Amino acid sequence: MSPNINDAFPSNYLKASDLKGTQAVVTIDRVDFEEGGRDKEEKPVIYFVGKTKGVVLNKTNSRKITEIIGSAMTEEWQGHAIVLYPTETEFAGEMVECIRVKAVNKAKMQKMTPEPKLKPKPAMMIELDTDNDPPDDEVPF
């Protein structure tokens, strides 16, 4: 197998080529603001549970996540699942690879990860207190 040219240019952030043409369901961990790019401007970077690389957010992906979650407040994004997928977009007059986001198809996810079937618990025997003591004021749970 020949080497992938993208491996020659490692990045601290997730690139479209890292997805290897597939979609990935990820759970949002946090959004940090980090300096980056040629102008060293602070940009939002979204990180995911169990992943080391984040995605630098652009307006398109930020708006889509806001639409999916229903909030523009990034601290409310934590714990929500989204789908990352590679595609192309026009930038500076040429087509370039990019990462886009979309909502998780809930029906498809349920088929992929069915809920465990719970076994019914056996009935418990309860002894009734027939004394005339008043009930305890504190509930044990």
Image (cartoon, helix red, strand yellow):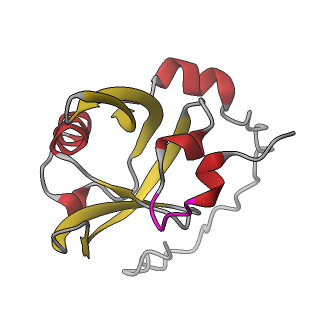
Total number of numbered labels? Answer: 0
Residue 48 x/y as whole percent: 47, 59
Task: Tell me which segment is drawn in magenta.
Answer: 9-13
Task: Tell me: 136 left or right of 125.
Answer: left
Kindly report the secondary structure that dominates the magenta region of the rendered protein. Answer: loop
Q: Is residue 68 depicted above or below 73 in this figure? A: above
Q: Residue at x 18, y 42 (%)?
A: 66
Residue 30 x/y as whole percent: 35, 66
Q: Is residue 79 depicted above or below 40 in this figure? A: above
User: In which quadrant of the rendered view does residue 63 lie?
Assistant: top left
Residue 51 x/y as whole percent: 56, 62
Q: Magenta span has 12?
A: yes
Q: Residue at x 23, y 58 (%)?
A: 76
Q: Residue at x 59, y 49 (%)?
A: 6
Q: Magenta span has 70?
A: no
User: In which quadrant of the rendered view does residue 89 lie?
Assistant: top left
44 or 117: nearer the viewer: 44
Task: Tell me: 3 left or right of 114.
Answer: right
Task: Tell me: 72 left or right of 26.
Answer: left
91 or 51: nearer the viewer: 91
Q: Residue at x 49, y 72 (%)?
A: 141
Where the N terminus falls, by quadrant? top right
Residue 67 x/y as whole percent: 18, 34
